[in-house]
Amino acid sequence: MSRKPISLKDIAKELNVSISTVSRALKNHPDISVALTTKIQALAREREFSPNPLAMGLLKQQTRIIGVIVPNLVTFFYSSIISGIESVARENGYYVLITSSYESYIKEKECVENLLSSRVEGLIVCLSKETKDYSHFEKIINKEIPLVFFDRVCRTSEFSSVVIDNRDMAFQIIKHFYESGARRIAHIAGPQHLSIACERFEGYQAGLKNCKLKFDKNLVEFIDLTIDDAAKAANKLLSLPDSPDAIFSVNDMVAYVTMKEIKRKGLRIPEDVLLVGITDEFHATVVDPPLTSIMHPTFDIGRECASLFFAQIQSKEKTPPIQKVMKTKLIVRESSVRKDRTC
């Protein structure tokens, strides 16, 4: 049976002194006599006393903990961003408490409440795909607790955020398709209440216009970002009488599902259908053919989020929100280059 860790209260009770006396003696405070300091420190060593940073932080009204909420904990995109956040947190002597909304609005609200109850000093959040109502963040505004959003953001006039230029990214993808010979470019889009999905759809439209290609609503499918919905959307597009010769997927997961549907129909990539995804996780390099994708600076996104958080913590006055826009890079692989065609 494991022994319960000894606390400041336990040491104080055994020596019949106050908790504050024990705390000061452990720090060699001059107000505590040498004899009592020696006695307290000797007992602390004997009992293997170890300070509880959370408890000490609560005494000081400062836990040095950042709460982080992400849609899931298994995707490299989020884990890499968390690593970036943690790197800056460590540099500043802070810890990170990570929770997942599992893409649920209800769960996201619970995460906010649980983290605030844990006395975190602020939050860094990526919204769930279900989140349309942002009222659960009102308490954070009222308490003037630092809050930074990333990727899926909201209320940018009130909160700082770190994003990528989704419109330009989508624009560049359509341009790349066009230069590879595609003329019927489809888009499997995400829910339009999500900022990233809306901006990517706008970039898709702008890209078509720039290439002098007519927008065709039949070439756009809006999905809820589930595997089943992505498969249905891909199958519907590929079953059109005049099917697309290129498909721009809202993220890599959707691209992988689309790739499977293309092969299931006996079509070839890139000979029959060009394909591009977004995020550029490791899997993009090992699928057949390798997937063209947009590389996100995920670790740097995390560091920027944490930097904005600490800027708020360290500021003596309330500062206006800052919107950081990070650069991406199109990584061209075999899935989007049709070697037997020219523009």
Image (spheres, rainbow, N blue to C red):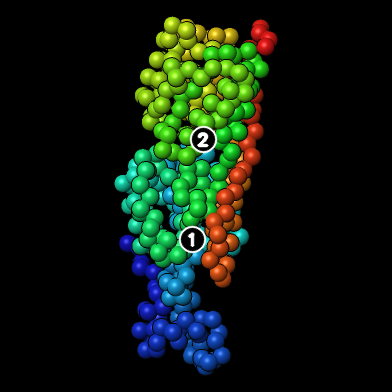
Residue in the foreground of this view, choosing between 108 and 2: 108
Q: Where 87 sits versus 182, above or below?
A: below
Q: Secondary structure at mark 2?
A: helix
Q: Residue at x 38, y 31 (%)?
A: 224
Mark sitting earlier along the chain (2/1): 1
User: In the picture, which quadrant includes the C terminus?
Assistant: top right
- Tell me the amino acid under the disc marked 1: Pro
SS at circle 1: loop
Residue 66, percent from left and from top: 48, 59
Q: How many numbered circles are shown?
A: 2
Task: Name the foreground residue: 233 vs 242.
Answer: 242
Q: Considering depth in this image, is 137 or 39 the residue closer to the camera?
A: 137
Q: Which residue is mark 2?
A: 199
Residue count near mark 1 (Cα–Cα under 10 Å), binned few <14, some 14–19, many ≥20:
many
Q: Residues within 10 Å of mark 2 (few under 14, many from 20)?
A: some
What residue is at 50 percent from the left and 50 percent from the top? 156
> Do we see residue 285 in this rendering?
no
Please state if 319 lies on the left or on the right of 141 as rendered.
Answer: right
Going by the numbered disc 2, the residue's amino acid type is Glu
Q: Residue at x 47, y 42 (%)?
A: 152
Question: Residue 331, how many percent across, how many down?
Answer: 64, 28
Q: Residue 121 appears at what percent x and percent y?
A: 46, 63
Q: Which residue is mark 1?
A: 146
Quarter of the image with the N terminus is bottom left
Label 2 vs label 1: CA separation?
26 Å
Give above or below for 283 relative to 159: above
Indicate which disc residue 326 carries. Answer: none
Task: Identify the residue shown where x is 41% and y is 60%.
Answer: 140
